[in-house]
Amino acid sequence: MKILVLGSRGMVGSAICRRLNDENVMAVAHIRGDADLLHQESTRDYISKTNPDAIILAAAKVGGILANRDLPYDFIAQNLIMQSNVIDTAVTLGVKKFIFLGSSCIYPKHAPQPLKEEYLLTDKLEPTNEPYAIAKIAGVKMCQAANRQFGLNYISLMPTNLYGPNDNFDLETSHVLPAMIRKYLDAKESGTTVQLWGTGTPRREFLHVDDLAEAVWFTLNNYNTFDHDLLNVGTGTDITIQELSSIIARQTGFQGETAWDSTKPDGTPVKRLDVNRMRQAGWNSSIGLEEGIRSTIEWYQEHHHNKV
C-alpha cells in the first residue's frame, strides 16, 4: 500500500508519518515544495504522479483564538481551497481511501455535551473560530458526497484539541496548551507573572498527537463508510483551562503567579467529544495527559526553548 500524507511537516502529519514508518507500507511525505495545495494544477499533477492507494489530508491552516480573530478570511479561504483541490483530485483519479482530518470546532457552540457526530449543523458555531469551522464542515460534506455519488471510502476524523512534538509554540498563532508551555517556561526563567487569556473556567479535552496518528492507522485498516463516515477522536474526558495551567506550571517547575485576563474571550464554555463510535470499533487513546504534557515540554526544551 502506498499512502500519501499531505502536510507531513506539521505536528499531525509528522506524527502520522512516524506511525506509518513502523508498518510495512510506503509512506509518501508531502512537503510544501513538492506541490502547492492552494493551486489546483500543482495539486493534481503531484497526486497523479504519486499515484497513491490512500491519501491522508493533514495539511491545513490552523491557529488559536488570536489568529482566528485576526485572520478570518485566511482561515476560511485557504482551507476551503486546499481541501477542495485535494478531495476533487482524489475523486477524479479514483483514489479509493481518503482520511480527512478536521476539528471538534465543527460542532455548535451550545450543543449538548459530550459532542456527538450527529450534532453537526444543528445550531450556531462558536464565533471566534467560525470561518475555520465552516471550511472543515465543507470538507466533511465533500467527503460524504463523494461516498454517496461514487461509492468511495472517504472518512472524516474530528480530533479534539491536539498537542505534542512539532506543535506550534508561537504566542501569536498557537493553541492554548503549547502557548502555556512556552509562557510558563519563559516566566520561570525571567521570574515574571504568567498572563493567560479568559477566566480559566472553560473545559477542554486534549489528545496527544501520537494517539491521533494511531487512530488514523486504525481507521485505514479497520473502518469503512458502510458504518460511519464521520468519527470523533479524543479521550472522552476534559479539564478546565485553569486545571491545565496548574499541570503545566507543575511540570515546568514554575512557582510564580498566574494572572487571568477576563476581558479576553473564553471561547466555547465546554467542549468534550463523544468517542463511542471509535471505542465500539476497537480504538482507545492510550497516552495520559500528565505523561503527554511532560514529554511535550521535554521536546520543546530540546528543540525550541531559547530558539523561538
Image (cartoon, rainbow, N blue to C red):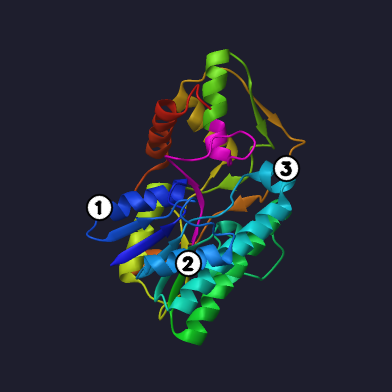
> Of callouts 1 and 2, which one flags the residue occurring earlier in the amino acid sequence?
1
The verdict on residue 228 being magenta is no
Q: Position of residue 290 (x, y in %)?
A: 41, 36
Q: Nearer the viewer, mark 3 or mark 1?
A: 1
Residue 45 appears in the figure: yes
Q: Is residue 182 left or right of residue 265?
A: left
Q: Which of the 4 quarters of the picture holds residue 30?
A: bottom left
Question: Disc 1 versus disc 2: distance between alpha carbons?
Answer: 28 Å
The residue beneath circle 2 is: 45
The residue beneath circle 3 is: 265
Q: Position of residue 1 (x, y in %)?
A: 28, 67
Q: Residue at x 48, y 24 (%)?
A: 305
Q: Nearer the viewer, mark 2 or mark 3?
A: 2
Which mark is on residue 22? 1
Q: Position of residue 257 (x, y in %)?
A: 61, 20
> Of callouts 3 and 1, which one flags the residue occurring earlier in the amino acid sequence?
1
Asked which secondary structure carries label 3, the reply is loop
The boundaries of the magenta stretch are 156-180
Which mark is on residue 282? none
Question: Disc 3 versus disc 1: distance between alpha carbons?
Answer: 41 Å
Q: Residues within 10 Å of mark 3 (few under 14, many from 20)?
A: few
Q: Residues within 10 Å of mark 2 (few under 14, many from 20)?
A: few
Asked which secondary structure carries label 2, the reply is helix
Q: Position of residue 154 (x, y in %)?
A: 45, 73
Question: Disc 2 versus disc 3: distance between alpha carbons?
Answer: 43 Å
